[in-house]
Structure formats: structure tokens, C-alpha cells
Image: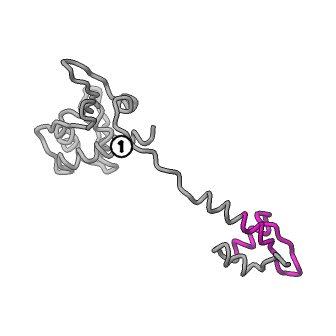
Amino acid sequence: MNTDLTTAEAADQARVTLATVRHWCRFGAVAARKIGRRWAIDAASLAHRVALGIRRAKPAAPKPVVFSVENMVAIGGSRWTKAGKDRVYLNDWATYAGLETGRYNTGNIASASYQGERISNSQAYKILGSIDKVWFDAADGKLHCRFGITESRVATREDVWDAIYSGIRAAIAAL
């Protein structure tokens, strides 16, 4: 029984292009031999190659994002316990929101950008004033924030909070 396939038959079985099958033949990814100008491809070798490709194509299961005291401390939070409360404060929340500031020696903002776009220094101050505190509460397992008194034209307080939340999730996923 002949178990050799033509490149067209192999491409049809593997659901790839003719060029891919020829590439596999040239570089030894499948057992094949030249007969004149055509390739004779071993069917069992092709089946094995296709099975390898299917195994590699399955994406790895995404790492679940778990809000926990340990993860919050690992991304830079400060743990605080007092009067029966167990919290992790994220004092560098502006970084998670995507707010980057350069400062003068006096402490005043010299330059600012929000999520990659340059913004005025006054708008950066307003974004910084729009969120007062960000913390993780171990009792309920949730992130919380206390809004500040200012609001920027660049982003509402809710937009900033959404950016912080997404940034924290991304930082935990990267652990």
C-alpha cells in the first residue's frame, strides 16, 4: 500500500498552503523524498507533524488575577493593620493609572504625561488631586479608593479610577 502523498494532498490534509508543505519537506519537518521535481510525502510523518502543530497551537491558560494581601504587597503596597482592619495601601497609584511626572528639585511638576500623552502640569496636579487614597481591604478582598476634591479636563475621577484598577490588575498578572 502506498502511503506517499503529493504536496496538494498533504496541504489539504494539514490545512496549510502548498508553500508550507514544500518548506516542511525541504527542512525535514516531514519525511519526504524527491521524485523528479515532485515531493512524495510520508502520510504518517505528515500526521505526526500536524499533531505537533495542534499541540503548540493551544494557548496556555491565562494566569488568574487574584487580589490578595500578598499580591498587593508584591506590587509595592504597604500593609497596615489597626483596630481590626487589615489593609494594603497603594501609595504609588498614579503609576498604575499611567500618570508620569518629572519634578523640579523644589518638588513642583516639571513635565507630565497621562497614558502616554503629554498633558499640562496643572492637569497633572488635578489628576493627582482627583484620587485621595487607594487601598486593598483584606476583609472584603476588594480594591477601594477615596476620591479627592479636584477633577481634570483630561480624565474624570472615574476614568482615573478605572485606569488604576486596570493597572493594578496588569501588575498582578505580570507577577
**Is 18 drawn above or below residue 80 in the view shown?**
below
**Is 104 drawn above or below residue 121 in the view shown?**
above
Q: Is residue 24 left or right of residue 117?
A: right
Question: Circle 1 — which element?
Answer: helix
Position in image of residue 77 (x %, y %): 33, 29
| Image-quadrant location for residue 16 | bottom right
Q: Is residue 22 magenta?
A: yes
Q: Residue at left 20%, top 33%? A: 133
**Is 128 drawn above or below residue 22 in the view shown?**
above
Q: Residue at left 16%, top 36%? A: 146
Q: Is residue 98 magenta?
A: no
**Is 119 drawn above or below residue 56 in the view shown?**
above
- The amino acid pointed to by label 1 is Arg
Position in image of residue 38 (x %, y %): 83, 80
Crowding near pointer 1: few (<14 within 10 Å), some, many (20+)? some
Q: Is residue 29 left or right of residue 82?
A: right
**Which stretch is magenta?**
19-48
Position in image of residue 55 (x %, y %): 62, 58
| Image-quadrant location for residue 67 | top left
* Image quadrant containing the C terminus: top left
Q: Nearer the viewer, residue 5 or 135?
A: 5
Q: Residue at left 27%, top 33%? A: 136
Name, please, the residue furthest toward the top: 83
Q: Nearer the viewer, residue 34 or 101?
A: 34
Position in image of residue 91 (x %, y %): 27, 30
The residue where tag 1 is placed is: 169
Name, please, the residue furthest toward the right: 36
Q: Residue at left 19%, top 44%? A: 123
Q: Is residue 11 left or right of residue 42?
A: left
